[in-house]
Amino acid sequence: MNAFEIYGGTPLKGDIIPQGAKNEALQILSAVLLTEEAVTVSNIPDIKDVNKLIDLLRDLGVEVNRQSKDTYTFRAQHIDLDYFKSEEFKAKGSGLRGSIMIVGPLLARFGRAAIPRPGGDKIGRRRLDTHFLGFVKLGARFHYDPDSHFFNVDATNLKGTYILMDEASVTGTANIVMAAVLAEGTTTIYNAACEPYLQQLCKMLNRMGAKISGIGSNLLTIAGVDRLGGTNHRMLPDMIEIGSFIGLAAMTESEITIKDVHFNELGIIPTVFAKLGVQFELRGDDIFIPSQQSYEVDTFIDGSILTIADAPWPGFTPDLLSIVLVVATQAKGNVLIHQKMFESRLFFVDKLIDMGAQIILCDPHRATVIGLNKAFKLRGIEMTSPDIRAGVSLLIAALSAQGKSVIHNIEQIERGYQDIELRLKALGAAIRRIDAIPQTL
């Protein structure tokens, strides 16, 4: 097991380029199963979760050719549907939550699919009902074996229908869209997710020959077609990385330029950091964050404490709430962080409290952060990363803290952040990888 050893308290400086979007990649790469023609995808992040999905596609029979570090060509001409029955598939599929995304395209093109109950972050119960209820609406037959934890879905003739989704799930919407593009007739999806990554998927499918309208809204209309062709696609930069780097700059009093951010696709992310007092300016399509010795939290107009909560797009993404929380620990002023969508994502705050942060964990969904304007620096400690986003939040805290920190279970961080150690070193961070005995969570 590896760990990061970090000596914090040093301002960083330089340019950093965000990786391709992890959450977009899991949708886009699954969509290559919808056609037997070649699909070339660029700006793919070189991270564990994405590489696991690429390996899974290869095992299913997809021809995979790597053109460069971030560009692949996929051709799903000969798919081995019997691979579903193998122990290898059970092991690989259960180790990657994103594996659920292959079900929609396989149903659409081949009429059947199976998947073990996917794994992923330990951040609370993330149900898959939305995916399977949508498939059933389209005419699929669904069976879950509680003994083997296996989902089996059969659908020889999907038919378009009206679907009112019970939640605006991004992955659920993407999966249903991919199933519906080859269904007979017209499918209408209401309460659909409308995140930029879902928009990217729909635009790519339209270039492949799909007929999807309403892109960017919560009402999608999909006219089924007989087949899809190949295309080229470039993924957006990862908005979660961009938000993480904004938080990193504020916490460490660093002067950092984040390159090529596709600012118009970031929604209210920059606005939320501005509410924390973080200064930045847009230079072309780059975000420049100057070195700040302090930053002050806004209040609401009536003077009441600022609340930052997650919500479906165009609300604030839950993946950045842990970053906002750690940034607030060194601000001037108080913030209530309300994590509505997941019940366990705030449980890492005990590590921040051990580092000296003033935080009251009100319940599994809410934490009050008391910012003391950097009057007391965080202190380095030994800790363990429970999930991707909490892990990066702890990494940011460690880079701002006095003394040495050690973060265990960095495999969680590396599931979502490409070459994070090397990129931080390029900014001047004192971070290195060490062998370590893993701690318990």
Image: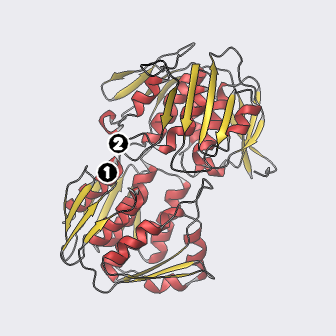
Residue type beneath disc 1? Cys
Of the pair 90 and 37, the residue shown nearer to us: 90
- Residue 150 is marked as none
Q: Is residue 400 above or below residue 117?
A: above
On screen, residue 415 versus residue 399, left or right, reads: left
The residue that mark 1 highlights is: 194
On screen, residue 67 versus residue 122, left or right, reads: left
Kindly identify the residue that appears in the image at 41 percent across and 55 percent down: 25
Q: Residues within 10 Å of mark 2 (few under 14, many from 20)?
A: some
Locate residue 135, reporting x and y percent.
36, 74
Kindly identify the residue that appears in the image at 46 percent across and 51 percent down: 22
On screen, residue 341 versus residue 11, left or right, reads: left
Whichever of labels 2 and 1 marks the residue nearer the N terminus, that label is 1
Residue sitting farthest toward the right: 437
Residue type beneath disc 2? Pro
The residue that mark 2 highlights is: 314
Q: Is residue 325 above or below residue 156?
A: above
* Residue 68 visible somewhere in the drawing: no
Of the pair 71 and 341, the residue shown nearer to us: 341
Helix, strand or loop at disc 2?
loop
